[in-house]
Image (cartoon, rainbow, N blue to C red):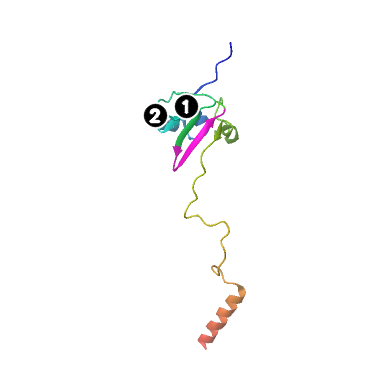
Amino acid sequence: MSDPAPKLRLDKWLWFARFFKTRSLSAARVAAGDVRVNGERVTKRATTVTAGDVLTFAIGDHVRIVEVVAIGNRRGPAPEAQALYTDMSPPPPPRKDAVPENPKFEGKGRPTKRERRQADLSRARHLE
């Protein structure tokens, strides 16, 4: 007989994969019904997940869609946690208040040495 596919509690897997800082936080989010497993809303913390399951949940303003690749056996460092899933989330929309990558300088900011000299000369003329 073949070995059954390894399974792990949903709240524990979310904690292993470092989506939540504590296991209590992940369990609370699952109990609140904020997590979907393969499109089905889940409220039981002990729901088991296996490789190939797709999880959908929100963290802040961002909706995360991840596919479980591996179960894992501990909460390890970030690179080990990132190996447990494949992120299928759409990229977040660009922020409206974000600064453009390369803004064109239009004479704003600190004046050049030449502009400072001209300003000093004009002040000196006004004082005479």
Please name the residue that numbered disc 2 is placed on. Answer: 31
Relative to 7, is 54 above or below? Answer: below
Look at the magenta stretch and give its main secondary structure: strand
Which residue is at a point 56% across and 34% down the rendered structure image?
86
Relative to 7, is 24 above or below? Answer: below
Q: Position of residue 40 (x, y in %)?
A: 42, 28
Q: Secondary structure at mark 2?
A: helix
In the rendered image, the residue lying farthest to the front is 39
* Quarter of the figure that contains the N terminus: top right
Relative to 107, is 62 above or below? Answer: above
Magenta residue check for 60 = yes
Q: Which residues are magenta?
A: 58-69
Please name the residue that numbered disc 1 is placed on. Answer: 10
Answer few, some or many: residues within 10 Å of disc 2's Cα (few below 14, many 20 plus, some between 14 and 19): some
In the rendered image, the residue lying farthest to the left is 32
Q: Position of residue 73 (x, y in %)?
A: 56, 24
Which residue is at a point 51% across and 39% down the rendered structure image?
89
Magenta residue check for 35 = no
| Amino acid type of the residue that numbered disc 1 sits on in the rendered structure | Leu
Answer few, some or many: residues within 10 Å of disc 1's Cα (few below 14, many 20 plus, some between 14 and 19): many
Q: Position of residue 36 (x, y in %)?
A: 44, 31
In the rendered image, the residue lying farthest to the top is 1
